[in-house]
Amino acid sequence: MSQQILEGLAAIVNEVAGVPVADVQLDKSFIDDLDIDSLSMVEVVIAAEDKWGVKIPDSEVKNLKTVGDAVTFISANS
Amino acid sequence: MTAVITPTSGAKYAKIMAVGSYRPERIVTNAEICERIDSTDEWIRERSGIIERRYAAPDESVVDMGADAAALALSRSGVPPGEIGMILAANVTHPYPTPAAAAEIAYRIGAVNAGALDIAAACAGFCYGIGIANDLVCGGSAKYVIVIGVEKLSDWTNHADRSSAFIFADGAGAVVIGPSDYPAIGPTIWGADGAQKDAITMTESLIDYRNNGGEIFPTLIMQGQQVFRWAVSEMPKVAGRALAAAGVELADLDAFIPHQANMRITDAIAKALKLPAHLPIARDIAYTGNTSAASIPLAMDRMLTAGEIPHGGTALLVGFGAGLVFAAQVVILP
């Protein structure tokens, strides 16, 4: 499940920000490692909500610092 | 007794006959903005697409700019000022709750037989005006209507706030709407979400400021990520509904002219709509900033004047902003 979410998230990050799919790993920080700014992060969140039918409130977005944080949140809430 | 009242009757269809705009003289660069906030030209361009914007002179008012844009649109339309039946001035920055800016604008341009009122629908105000003007002309309450979008946002900006100081700017645009032999304004799709009233608002009311004092005069404040999320997730749906209501396909469009809120929002909406790659998209924000109600007619006039989009072409307009409110329609370009 987590591997599938990671792959789906990598595709989204690639689509939104042009980051190579292979760079999107669990330990990577969206901001520091993948150079995703706050507006791109919102786009990633919207796409993730659509794909997995989860609700990721604005208050939660700031806690999703790494790709792993996002994978954990999505798998726990979808 | 119940009298028999003569009903109004109007034109079968309405169209935009002409557009005009006014850009203040003073260009404000990102470097100048960064004299008061901790930011850089590069950061502002990345986050907003804004390279420069225009500020009105201290003694240049919403009425001044609105009247200039309206006068230009009126002269291009060929309609005599005395035949204008209504002036709608969409704005949120006229500094008097009353009287409305529209009445003085009507007086200035010689629209002596026109009714006049302001529309307070923020960045969606121009599209609200188009929808209302269409119904006034088709309903018979006015033969010709001038819709103005005008803002002097620089008066209501906290120039020391690094999250918003670079966004807002000043300007005006206007259109003349009159009867048409063919359908030229599609159904307006509009709505409001007052639950998100705090997403874009003022730091406090003028009354609270008067009663309680405070270091900073009330200014605009925006929850950037919340607004971005709402615009990017909801406006493509609104645009799709406007297209469907008009019976127009994406392939029929000659222009996409959304409110110039932020280049990143424009890009994200365009991507979500899957617009054809060749379709001209308004990117006037780069040199104009976010001028709220004025941004769509400013962009329309620039694109038509530059020859980027054809007279008589089909354009999709989408306005969205504080309220939160939105409005969209398909129009035939003047």
Image (tube, grey):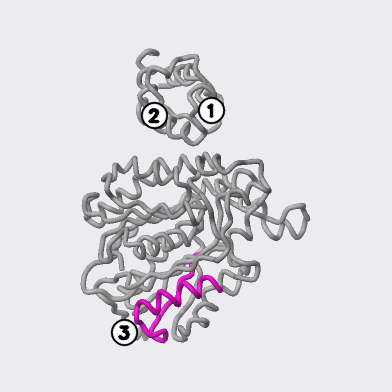
Q: In the image, what residue type sits under mark 3?
A: Thr
- Eye-nearest disc, 3 or 1: 1
Q: In the image, what residue type sits under mark 1?
A: Glu
Which chain is indicated by disc 3?
B
Residue at the spot x=58%, y=49% of the render?
B30
* Residue B69 on the magenta segment: yes
Identify residue for label 3: B6
Query: Can you say whether B270 is above or below A53 in the image?
Result: below
Which chain is indicated by disc 2?
A
Q: Which mark is residue A73?
A: none
Query: Can you say whether B155 is above or below B12 in the image?
Result: above
Residue at the spot x=47%, y=86% of the render?
B112
Identify residue for label 2: A18
Looking at the picture, how far across and down is residue B37, in whole percent?
66, 45
Real-space Cα separation, disc 3 to disc 1, in angstroms = 59 Å
Identify residue for label 1: A60
Query: Can you say whether B67 is above or below B159 in the image?
Result: below
Looking at the picture, how far across and down is residue B194, in whole percent?
51, 50
Asked whether residue A64 appears in the rendered view, the answer is yes
Real-space Cα separation, disc 3 to disc 2, in angstroms = 63 Å
Instruction: Name the quadrant of the C terminus of chain B.
Output: bottom left
Which residues fall within the magenta stretch?
Answer: B64-91
Looking at the picture, how far across and down is residue B188, in whole percent?
34, 59
Which type of secondary structure does the marked residue at label 1 adopt?
helix
Which type of secondary structure does the marked residue at label 3 adopt?
loop
Q: Are marks 2 and 1 on the same chain?
A: yes
In front of the other: B203 or B76: B76
Q: In the rendered picture of this protein, how many numbered marks are placed on residues? A: 3
Q: In the image, what residue type sits under mark 2?
A: Gly
Label 3: few (<14), some or many (≥20) within 10 Å? Answer: few
